[in-house]
Image (cartoon, helix red, strand yellow):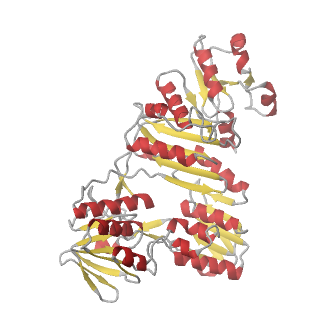
Amino acid sequence: MKIVVVGGGAGGSSFAARMRRLNEKAEITILEKTKETSIASCGLPYFIGDIIEDRSDMQVASPAFFKQLFNIEVQLNAEVVLINPQEKFVQTADGRKFIFDKLVIATGTTPFIPQIDGLENMPHFIVKTLADADKIKTFIEQKKPEKATVIGGGFIGVEVTENLSHLGMKTTLVEMADQVLLPLDMDMVSQVHTEMRKNGVELYLKDGLKKIGPKKLLLNSGKEIPSDILILAVGMRPETKLAEASGIKLTEKGLIITNAYMQTNFADIYACGDNVAVKDFVTGNLTMIALAGPANRQGRLIADHIAGHYPYSYTGTQGTGIVKIFDKTVAFTGNNERQLQQSGIDYEKMIILANSHASYYPGAESITLKVLYSSDGQILGAQAVGKEGVDKRIDIIATIMRLKGTTADLRDAELCYAPPYSGAKDPINLIGMAIENVRQGLVKPYFGIDFNDMFVLDVRPPQIYAQEHIDGAVNIPAGQIRSRLAELPKDKTIMVHCFKGYTSYVVARILMQNGFSHVLSYAGGWNFYKSLKE
């Protein structure tokens, strides 16, 4: 059996290696149009920032490695320009033909480079390949730029911004949307904006690049930004023109359509990776989610299907991701509020602030954890921001989601506990308990920053209240509530808040059992409120 793989990235390489482990006799060839294959592309920003110092660490598997261990032929600088599904061959730009019995298209994405007036006036780069990173590093070493600008606030844009700052450059990030990292909701991403600004990054949101002159950029808002180097990270487009020309069916957005086994409309042609339309795990809609993990798993799935080795179907992509922003870590899975609204899905939400491990053990850090869920307790998405333990919590929620668990399973999850690692009630348990309290009618949460016509009850200690508080808030410490119920109105909504949201819940329960029928507890407490106001 002759197998040709077009593209040597995560999906293509994963497929080829798995296929060889399942079939020693197959003739497997990877055709890669660039000079590199199987690189650690997610590590490029950190290679640029000298966090990863050794260039060889960026090469996950060389062509020689593929040949020696797997007997897989890797052809570099082999750009495929034609796919003939009927006669089953592909042709490269230099005229060579490769016959196949099975073909895997893993061409990934290509960076979008916008047409900008004066782009030639400033050294500009993209971040897609190791060669791109080499160019950026060489420019920095030779020209020693002092001011850098990044256009685009996605994963790559944010990570490159941090790493250019790490190199000592005054760095600016420009983003057309009103936030960076669109998988996050605005109430969570506010902490990211604060962290970036705290570390000297100048953020221009809801703005774009209009014109470029020597040593300066003109934004749509009219603002001029001095800059010595420009990084374009405005997004990726699926590399599917080759597939389209061969008759392979695409979505309206240019993504390859496959069945559950990653087969295209030609049974012997498969596709995997960032160029494929995947089923959103939450909504069931076809979408583009460009992540290395799903690409690797799709490649493995295709190999199992071709080999007839316990074939299984692809069940969708959750969009689980994580990104480091200076001293903060942000992670997410599933849908955010905007995506659910666009899909017409009703949802509820819960936000808590919890410690990464037992508060009495040194070094505990705060985690802001948000879960979106349906009225019947199905988990629709989750987001977390913090310094420590963020990945652990989102990984747990992502796994429970994958297994069709509910918010009650968050409450009941039995997780590792020792003071250096967690509390006896992990943040996962705490948010599950908080959600179940709401679902059982024990409390109603509040998430906003407007308190019109509400009686704002601050139950923190008086000395803390004196330092800072919500305008108009009345301070009655939690321990005095039962003896001062007469001071509270029964004809107004009482919005109770504390530090993190737990004490306000306790006070809300006291009030609700003493004849107060309109009581809200501020989710996340004063600390979360402050992050929204910053």
Left or right: 369 as drawn, with respect to 25 = right
Residue 255 lies, in percent from the top left, at 35, 63
**Screen quadrant of the N terminus:** bottom left
Can you tell which quarter of the image residue 512 is in? top right
Residue 194 lies, in percent from the top left, at 68, 51
* Towards the viewer: 498 or 232: 498
* Residue at (47, 22) in percent of width and height: 440
Left or right: 370 as drawn, with respect to 202 = left
* Towards the viewer: 314 or 172: 314
Can residue 509 be spotted in the picture? yes
Can you tell which quarter of the image residue 420 is in? top right
* Residue at (60, 32) in percent of width and height: 523
Q: Is 108 situated above or below 449?
A: below
Can you tell which quarter of the image residue 171 is in? bottom right
Q: Is 227 situated above or below 311?
A: below
Residue 217 lies, in percent from the top left, at 66, 71
Left or right: 8 as drawn, with respect to 170 = left
Question: How many numbered discs?
Answer: 0
